[in-house]
Amino acid sequence: MTAVPPHPEKPLVRLMEERDGEETARLYQELAAASPETHDPAVAEDEGWFFNDRASVDDDWAGFVVDLGDGRLAAMAIGRDTGEHGVVEAMVTGAEWRGQGWGRRVLRALLGWLYDRGVDSVLVEAEAGSEPFYAALGFAPCPGFEPGQEMQLDLNALPCDRH
Ligand SMILES: CC(C)(COP(=O)(O)OP(=O)(O)OC[C@H]1O[C@@H](n2cnc3c(N)ncnc32)[C@H](O)[C@@H]1OP(=O)(O)O)[C@@H](O)C(=O)NCCC(=O)NCCS
């Protein structure tokens, strides 16, 4: 069978793998740079490698990426199933790829994975400035919400086109 060559105009949304470690670390550094008040840039690279490790080996974790087909990732969403609810642990679109729908696609992939495991609700600590993004995906502020605090999504209330 002939392998289909990567197509730079049609990035692929797929599960994160161990081989994505370097790009996961790079994107996580972009996330940390966007929220310096809650992230220490000095440890962001290590944290990125940690999240890649969890998403690659831990059955309760998953990551989804937008693969540009040339070794680069445009976006990633990493989360886990606590057994009681889902958590979005890391969500970032590379600066040059923002505003093109990639964040929505990759987060929806993660939400689909959680839904398929029977998870009912998903929490995220929404960094300041990211609330409109989560709100566009159906997340609602938890009571007493302030920037940087939790938003919640009822997965059973998702529209049918969530995939
Ligand atoms: C927040 C972030 C992940 C959004 O990713 P993105 O790929 O640009 O988002 P999308 O293009 O898929 O946007 C999806 C929806 O969210 C909305 N949206 C995204 N960013 C927005 C913003 N800053 N303000 C208002 N709306 C926004 C879009 O308008 C779109 O809604 P629409 O389809 O109804 O128009 C990205 O800006 C980012 O990585 N920021 C830095 C890191 C960060 O804050 N991560 C979140 C950590 S909790």
Image: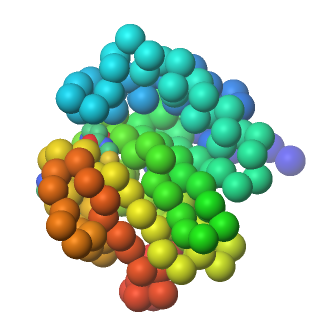
Q: How is the image coloured?
A: rainbow
Q: Position of residue 115 (x, y in %)?
A: 59, 75
Residue lying furthest right: 1
Q: Residue at x 86, y 47 (%)?
A: 1
Asked whether the viewer can see residue 136, the reply is no
| Left-right relation of 157 to 97 | right
| Left-right relation of 107 to 114 | left
Asked whether the viewer can see residue 134, the reply is yes
Q: Foreground: 82 or 62?
A: 82
Q: Position of residue 16 (x, y in %)?
A: 63, 42
Q: Position of residue 89 (x, y in %)?
A: 47, 47
User: Splitting the image into 4 quarters, where does residue 5 fall?
Assistant: top right
| Left-right relation of 82 to 91 | right
Q: Is residue 86 above or below residue 16?
A: below
Q: How many marks?
A: 0
Q: Residue at x 53, y 47 (%)?
A: 78
Q: Residue at x 62, y 61 (%)?
A: 81
Q: Foreground: 33 or 68?
A: 33
